[in-house]
Image (cartoon, rainbow, N blue to C red):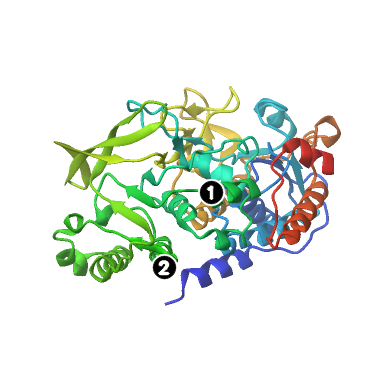
Amino acid sequence: MLSRKFLTKNLINSCLFSTNTVVKNALRACIVGSGPSGFYSSQYLLKHLPDCRIDLIEKLPVPFGLVRYGVAPDHPEVKNVINTFSKTAENPNFNFYGNISLGKDVSLNELRQLYDVVVLCYGSDVDSPLGIKGEDIKNVISAREFVGWYNGLPHLENFNPDLSGEEAILIGQGNVAIDVARILLTPIDILSKTDITEYALEALSRSKIKKVYLVGRRGPLQAAFTIAELREMLKLPNTDTYWRQTDFEGIPEKIDSLPRPRKRITELMVKSLNEAKQSSNNKKFLPVFFRSPTQFIGNDKVESVEFSINILENESAVATDKSESLQTQLVCRSIGYKSISVDASINFDDKLGRVINKEGRVLKKNSNEVDVGLYVAGWLGTGPSGVILTTMNNAFKISHTIIDDFRNGIIKCDTNKTGIDPRNYPCITWTDWLKIDKEETERGHKVNKPREKIVSIKEMLSIV
C-alpha cells in the first residue's frame, strides 16, 4: 500500500503548473486569505484554468496563515508546503496583496464588483470558550493564544503566560493540545534550533512546569490526537508518560475489533501503559480520560480545576455525580476554533461559526438560492476540522466546482471587472514579502535558527 506521504506528495506535484501568458478577458478571481485553503485554491485554479487571473488578499503583511502561525516550530517538515505555495506565487497570473483586510480596507461588495469570482478562505482564528465558572481567572488561557505567542503571531508578543508553577492542565486531546504539551516539556536546547520566537524561547527557558495533564471528556478509544503526535510525546527526552490504569479497563479486549487507524493508536497507548518506566528526575506527561471541567478555582490566578467524572453512553460523555479536582497553576483550553464574520454582507451562521454554503457555493441571505460567483473553502466553510491534507482536498474540491460553474456558463467573464488597483491600498506584494523573508532568515542564521520571525507589523512595513 502506498504511504499517505507518497500520495500527498504526488497529488501536490500533479497540480503544479508551468507559467502562462496572460489572456485578455480571462476569469478574474479574488481569494481572501493566504493560508493553506487560499493557496491550494489558487494552485488548482491556475493548473486547470491556466489563463485565469488570481489576486490573493491577506490581512497580514505576510502569507501562509496557519502554516506560519499554527504549525509547531519543531515540525519544520510540515512547513515544507510553503515551497509549493511559493511556486504558485511565482505564476505571472497570480498576485499576492498582503496588508489588506476584508471588512476594513475593502468590502465584500466592492470585491464582487471587481471580480468574476470571490472565494472566502480566511479561516478560523477565534478560540471556542468553555463557558464555565472561573474561565476569566488569570492564567486560564486558550491554545490559540499560546500557539500564536510562541509562533510570532502579531499582537501576541506581549501575551506572556505565567510559567512559574509546576503543573499545567490542557483541556482537550487534539493535536493542538499535544503540540502545546510538547512545547512545554521539550528541552530548551532542542527548541533553540527551531523558528520559535526568541521571547518565547527565553520564557520557556525559565519555565518551572514539570507536570502537564492532557484531559479529555471521553475515553482512550475516542482520543483525537494522531499516532504520530503521540509517538513523539512518548519519545520526548527527559519526560515520562503516566497513564491511569483505570482508564484502560476493558480496552485491550476491544483492540482486535477496532478499525486499523484506531487499533494502531490504541495498541501504542496500551503498550506504553504496560512498559512504563519512570524516573523521579524527569518531567511528567499525564493523559487523563473521562473528565470534563466544571469550574476553575483561584484568587489571583488559577489554583485548581474541578472535573466531573464521566461515563460513555453511545460514544457520548455523560457526567456522573462524582467529581475530581486537580491542582494547577496554568490552564490551557484547546477545544477548537471558530470563524467570525468580518463583513456584514457575508451570509454567516454565528452559532456554527461558518459561512452558510452548499458544497462550497455560498447561499444568499435568508434563501436557499446560490449567490453566483461567491464561494467558501477551508475551515470557514466546513468548521475547524482535519489537518492540512484535509484542507487541501477541500480546496481542490471547491476549485473544481468553480471550474464546472465557469465551463457550464453559470459564471461569465466581465471585461469591466479588472480587479483591485494595488495603488489604492496599503499593499504588500510578493516581492515585498521576499524582502521580509530574507531579513527573517538572516536574523535566524545569526543565532543558529532557520529564521527569526518579525512579529511587529510596523517593523514588517518598514523593511519594504
Q: Quadrant of the C terminus?
A: top right
Q: On residue 88, which mark appears?
A: none
Side (left or right) of 8 relative to 90? left
Residue at numbered disc 2: 235
- The reply, left or right, for residue 152 in relation to residue 262 is right
- The residue closer to the viewer here, 182 or 413, is 182
Q: Residues within 10 Å of mark 1 (few under 14, many from 20)?
A: few
For label 2, count other residues whose C-alpha is less than 10 Å away and answer few (under 14), some (14-19) or many (20+): few
Picture coordinates of residue 57, whole percent (x, y): 70, 40
Residue 25 image point, x, y percent: 79, 44
Question: Judging from the image, what secondary structure is the residue with disc 1 in?
Answer: loop
Is 154 located above or below residue 424 in the figure?
below
Work out which residue is located at the far bottom of the displayed protein and give it. 1
How many numbered marks are there?
Answer: 2
Where is residue 297 shown, x and y percent of the image?
32, 30
* Front residue (pair 207, 108): 207
Q: Quadrant of residue 457?
A: top right
Q: Earlier in the sequence, mark 1 or mark 2?
A: 1
Q: Which residue is mark 1?
A: 206
Residue at position x 56%, y 66% in the image? 11
Residue 47 shows in the view? yes
Residue 35, visible in the rendered structure:
no
Q: CA distance from mark 1 to mark 2?
A: 23 Å
- Give, as a three-letter code, the residue at label 2: Lys
**Secondary structure at numbered mark 2:** loop
Q: Quadrant of the N terminus?
A: bottom left
Dot in front, 1 or 2: 1
Q: Amino acid at mark 1?
A: Arg
